[in-house]
Amino acid sequence: MDSIRHWMLGPQGSAYANNVDDLYMFLVWLSVFFFALIVFLTVYFAWKYRRRKEGVLTPNISHNLALELLWSIIPLIIVMGIFFWGFNDYVRASVAPNDAIEIHVTGKKWLWAFEYPDGTRTIGNLHVPVNRPVKLILTSEDVLHDFYIPSMRQKTDVIPGRFVDLTFTPTVPGKHQVFCAEYCGKSHSDMMANLFVDSPEVYEKWLVEGDPELQQMPPVEVGKLVYENKGCNSCHSIDGSKNTGPSFKGLYGRMEKFADGTTQMVDDNYIVESINNPQAKIVAGYEPVMPTFQGLLRTPEMRGIIAYIKELK
Amino acid sequence: MADIITSPHISGHADHHDVDYLHDGKGLKSWLTTVDHKRIGVMYLWSILFMFFLGGVFAMMIRLELLTPKETIMSAETYNKVFTLHGAIMVFLFIIPSVPAALANFVLPLMLGAKDVAFPKLNLFSWYIYMAGALIAIAAMVTGGVDTGWTFYTPYSTTTDGSVALMTFAAFVLGFSSILTGVNFVATIHKLRAPGMGWFDMPLFCWGIYATALIQVLATPVLAITLLLLIMERTFGIGIFDPKLGGDPVLFQHFFWFYSHPAVYIMILPGMAIISEIIPTFSQKTIFGYRAIAFSSVAIALVSFIVWGHHMFTSGQSQLASAIFSFITFFVAVPSAIKTFNWIVTMYKGSVAFNAPMLYALSFLLLFGIGGLTGIFLGAVSVDIHLHDTYFVVAHFHYVMMGSTVIAFLGGLHYWWPKMFGRMYSEPAARIACALVFIGFNATFLPQFVLGSRGMPRRYYNYLPEFQALHQASTVGSWILGLGFLIMAGYLFASLRKKMDAPANPWHSRTLEWQTASPPITHNFHEVPSVGGGPYDYYRPVGTGRNA
């Protein structure tokens, strides 16, 4: 039974996920029962009363009130029970406890940005401590998005001009997947994030020092991580193919032509400017759609991405 | 009601009134200016079948692209346009007009014993509006396409490139065609029933179409207004839905689903209506619980207007609203259960034949069972929060829209084909095609329930590698499904090349459309039929009704 449950629903990340799965599995078995009943009756009647002779008259069974009430009232009682079950869980899950950590989330085409209570800001990676309620306060900068954490069985639409919130209490440490579940255009399916559920000590240390692995890594590898985790990869390819933005392959040292006709050689300062103030120079043939990353990259990360681009010849 | 009490045929009148409707007038002009509901029904039929083919090609492209993560055959931009067009074409240009405008247009007046619908010229006009809408939609496809999804959610739809305004205008125009057809059918059912035919002597198909027509008339104007507001915002920058202009994007969703949820029942009620005809005919049996089925159609139509918020549990609407919508939604389960069990029990002590239409009806019972039961998952708020906007929803509504409505439409097409064109198709080929469609459909959409439960969001061009096996199973299923449709197209077209060979009543049905020639004469009946008894009186010999 447990293996069916796991196969159908994937990993659980919280006690609430287990509640949702209980109702889900109850509905699965209820559906299996009623579907089997439908199949059995359909096949049994169809075969038992199959036509053996043409032109026979059949009995006039117009209706049977008791039977019809039976198959109205039984489903009604069952679905009312299901309503209260689903409603109860929903209400409990949508109220955040007072001690919840509040993290602000901003969705924009096509990345997720996070801002922690101490001012730490990240893109693409959300860190939270285990066994503590988290309240995400979400908004969008452009169109509708939807912040969806399958392992927490939680999602909410993220709406421009409005704040919505999403609460969960993670109990399973490790990495969890986050999707955008509301269609938002070209790179909708790449608008993912990672949710890292850390032990409280690791979480506190991370808030101060950033990702520990970054400190021992060569800059090129830091840059590769930045490229993958901060959303660069949803618009910039590394194989020369054209995407929403110019490819990083062979970019460094190239003379770039801009929409206003001017040109400039791509160097360290050009890359920094493009990240912090992307609308300053628009490469000819591309739309001015890149959001600013001002303040979102720590200095080693900025060095890393420059080194990474340099590597991509 | 099988009995046409008045003299069924007056011999010696070999004037043009005895010519069947297909041969009463030759040439394109005689078709384009016809006011005969049968010819208009046939013109609708070919129009929607073409659109079904187009939407089907887009569906096959979607499944092929999803064979692998990242690019398989097309870019992300193309994929987004393809799934949008698949949805928009299937909903607005195929399913909504499929049963009412094509099949019911043909058979409804015949079933009522009428010569035509109440407003024949309006009927032709609504076909022209449909064609205008279809042409505008095709223009939108070739002038930039649309990548918003068929739901046109703002503010994406007001800010993206492409021919969004043109496509929404097409849906706006098509809405009028739908409204006029609805008005026509309501008037026809009220005023043109044959002498002696009370409301409860009508075939249940007419009840289903009546309930559908009411929704078409009452709900479609809301869609028209919504789309007009969207066009105004997009074209003139009037702020209604976009928060940058002072609007509210959630308002659009309320407006949109206020129409589009009832529209789900515009799509499913006619399918149910067909099943209510096929099962008694092929069981040669009185339908079980006539009134319960008739009233549950009307009940579904009424409830459909107050459940739209169940599409919006994650939209940011208030928790109280979500709770109320969830509560009301569960009431849809009751009339659906009544209908399902009444259809099944109709076969009890019947004389069941397994011709192609009946195979589709039996398929319907199983697929609608799955579609309905998985709807319960989505009605429960906590489970819906997890499943919303995932493949679970995609699978669920395909079980209802395609597994139920389209399967019922195909059942109806095979049932009335001999009446419409006077020719029988190859029964063995039809059974094989039905089996392939049934197997292919389940192979395509069953894996998607698991995909969605595991968290795979919908409208994804790219996906994580762990989802690939189930996606591939689904894509292989779509090939089986496609093969079934190819075979179907083959034997249906082949039947049209034959000489007319269909008897007036090949299925020994008791409803009125079978009591005239196949194909019917232009005026349907030689004499106005007068009716005694019910539409499903298979317990008494033909010709022994209460007025006989």
Image: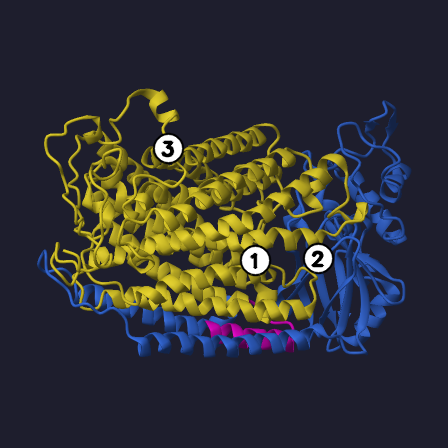
Chain colours: A blue, B yellow
Which circle marks residue A193 in the picture?
2
* Whether marks 2 and 3 lie on the same chain: no
Label 1: how many Cα within 10 Å (few below 14, some 14–19, many 20+)? many
Closer to the observer: label 2 or label 1?
Answer: 1
Q: Which residue is at 31% across, 37% downward?
A: B489
Q: Residue furthest left?
A: A53
Q: Amino acid at mark 3?
A: Met
Q: Chain of mark 2?
A: A
Give percent across and percent down for residue B512: 23, 48
**Image quadrant in which the N terminus of chain A is located:** bottom left
Q: Which residue is at 28% across, 54% downward?
A: B197
Give percent across and percent down for residue B176: 53, 39
* Label 3 secondary element: helix
Give percent across and percent down for residue A136: 77, 66
Q: Amino acid at mark 1?
A: Thr
Q: CA distance from mark 2 to mark 1?
A: 17 Å
* Label 1 secondary element: loop
Q: Is residue B220 magenta?
A: no
Give percent across and percent down for residue B189: 37, 49
Q: In the rendered structure, which segment of residues is drawn in magenta?
A: A9-27
Which circle marks residue B43 in the picture?
3
